[in-house]
Image (spheres, rainbow, N blue to C red):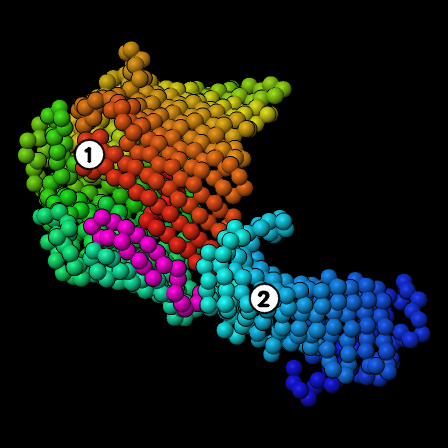
Amino acid sequence: MAAGDRKKNRWLKAALLAGAATCALMPVFSLPAYAQSPDIGTMEPKIPEGSKLVLAANELVYNRDNETVVARGAVQINYGGYHLVAREVEYDQKTGRLKARGNIELIEPTGNRLYGEEMDLSDDFANGFVNALRVETTDLTKMAATSGERVNDEEMILNHAVYTACTPCATDPTHRGVWEVKAERIVQNGRTKTIRLERARFEMFGKPIAYIPVLEVPDHTVKRKTGFLFPKFQYAQKLGFGVTTPYYIAIAPDMDATLSPTVLTNQGFLMEAEFRKRFHNGLITLRAAGIRQLNSDVFTANTSDRLEDGFRGMVASTGEFKINPRWAFGWNVMAQTDNNFSRTYEIGGLKDKTYVNQGYLSGLGRRNSFDLRAFYFDVQDADPNDEDERRQAIAQTLDHEYIVPQSVLGGELSVTTNITNIDRDLADTYTTLGGVDRFRGLEGGMTRLTSEVEWKRQFVVPGGLVLTPLLAARGDIHRLDMRSPAGYAGNYESDSSATRSMLTAGLEARYPILATTDYSTHLFEPIAQIYARPNEDLAGRLPNEDSQSFVFDATNLFERDKFSGFDRIEGGTRANIGLRYTGTFDNGVLLRSIIGQSFQLGGVNSFATPDLVNAGANSGLETDSSDYVGMAGFDLPNGISFSTSARLDKDDFSLRRSDTALRYDGVKVATEFVYTRIAGQPDYGLENSASELQSKAVFKFHDYWSVFGSLTYDIGNHVISRDGIGISYDDRDTVFSLFYERERDKYDNTANDWSIGARLMFRTLGDIRVGDSTLTGFE
């Protein structure tokens, strides 16, 4: 507010205070003579745009002699974005000061709330003094002081103050936070948008644990600010103890960076840097890290970690862009000086055993989808020859599906296209304990173009029977430039190209039966399918890259082609029959189940035809009558849920595979048990039966406090393969967790490992982490 306008505005505010209160209260109160307001009509006030003042009070007193206006009882003032509530407000026209008393609440335009018993403010709220002050910011940060002063509409100075963050206080005013900072003086600067705590003590649970001469943090209006972040700590046997002190740089509203120098007691100085740039439709990140390794002798001999006696480093980048609401593209790539740097030095987000480099372009419409991707699999191990990585495929894939918007012959017509290109330096083969060779990937290159057209239409005949006829035609073209698999028992296509096709005619019949009672609804749905088609062309004679993982269960019982990818095609005439049931009860209980069987009626059974990986071996579909498959489950309103799926031998009903899960989600307890059993599949690579029990649980034993743990038990080998336990506190302002985890390799004791992780986070102050701060299974 300009100095020349000060006097005019004082009179303006006085007139507005008097006039607004008088008009509002005249019908209710009979005011004494001295409270009559002056003739404001002669003042011709000129109210600046956006700065109108509104007053409400139970009583208004105007004193011409002292040039004061006093509002009493439930006083409310709105002016220029400020909202003031108090028991009494006195305005002095000569000094331009507002004095408020009793249960004061002042809401600033920023959303901050100031509470106090006495406030002395300038008429534009720019300056003032407050006794017994409390401040609440919009991000629920709280400050309290014996007194406070606002200076130049820029600084709020609090004396003998306390600073804390208290999210639970928004719903529970009696809640006391775990931590607080007591300071001789707190200065909140509106220009620099910082809060500076001077001569401060950091306290937890009411006990001082650290003295801090000066601590400066961003205020609630700042999302990003240049400065040091909380340090991070780590320990590894061959790296030693490490301390990281990240430094954050806010370059621009759309750019920032983080420098993370780390000192390692065994290996020296590791430097990491990350740059982030945001665009209107996406984000790019660039990362780099490097170290001049000081003590390579601690690493195992003849490994890439040992051989790299000098500089080691990496560069990486990610990108995510939305071209429009339907199309997106992006990438994540990494390059290293050797094959194990990021894993050895535990570079965050890049330390997985296999890092997947990829670029993609994808689109999704109402009736079509498109996905183009390129992959490179970076296997991070200490093998200096990179043999495992060279066995991985360098792959490019394109998937497109289109559904014709207009009906064709009254039905739906769809077109599916897939293009896959594969290149590999070394063959990926191994021999099972039973002496069966599996060729997971061949040396060389292969390209396959697949296109399939499918038409289907649904009819509902009298009586409720639902019939769905189906016609499909598929064709494949292969480019083959792969070395023939040595020792392969079957025939392998030796030509440089190959073609194959498949025609299918199918019919599905469903007969829904609805049964209702006073308290429940039950839907029984018998289902039968038949698919007639010729034998699979070139079965077992072509590379199998994307159809290697195959599990026959109730989820794919009614699939037309049960193979998981495009490299294999289900051939011959097959029928699938089953029963689906769903039950709903008024008390909230839900039931569901499926049971069924599949039959090879004619032609060559593709699942009985071996290929390079024996994909159909021991699957339960390799015989004319398949094994029985089923699943069942229920959900109870008290939080208990149960599901189980099983495959039973067609001859003796012995259990071939089962997956069972029991879960409970309660207010204080959440737990889950998962049991898996797989009978031996010697032709597929599993020599003996395997069974495993996984469990995890969380128990909330007090407000914000929880204990959690997990355990994985290998039943067949009578060994606990993984277990862990931890404790955590989380009230959203303070997060503390500590856990211990062990992992055992049943075949190699040298691979056994244990780890400890910890995290301590103070909202608005920082985050301290030691090791991996998440227990497996509790992401």
Residue 248, located in which quarter of the rendered image?
bottom left
Residue 63, located in which quarter of the rendered image?
bottom right
Q: Which residue is mark 2?
A: 160
Where is residue 104 drawn, in percent x and y?
71, 64
Badge 1: residue crowd in 10 Å (few <14, some 14–19, many ≥20): few
Residue 18, relative to residue 460: is it above or below? below
Identify the disc placed on residue 487: none
Which residue ends up furthest to the top in the rendered image? 652
State the extent of the magenta-drawn residues as a range. 224-245
Q: What SS does tag 2 mark?
A: strand
Does residue 293 appear in this view? yes
Pick the residue in front: 77 or 102. 102
Q: What SS does tag 1 mark?
A: helix
Q: Is residue 591 left or right of residue 649?
A: right
> Residue drawn 47% across and 45% down?
729
Where is residue 352 drawn, in percent x and y?
26, 47
| Amino acid residing under circle 1 | Asn
Does residue 137 appear in this view? no
Residues marked 2 and 1 touching at CB (< 8 Å): no
> Residue drawn 58% across and 64% down?
161
| Amino acid residing under circle 2 | His
Residue 649, relative to residue 540: is it above or below? above
> Residue drawn 33% across and 54% down?
233
Residue 777 within the segment the image draws in magenta: no
Identify the disc placed on residue 749: 1
Badge 2: residue crowd in 10 Å (few <14, some 14–19, many ≥20): some
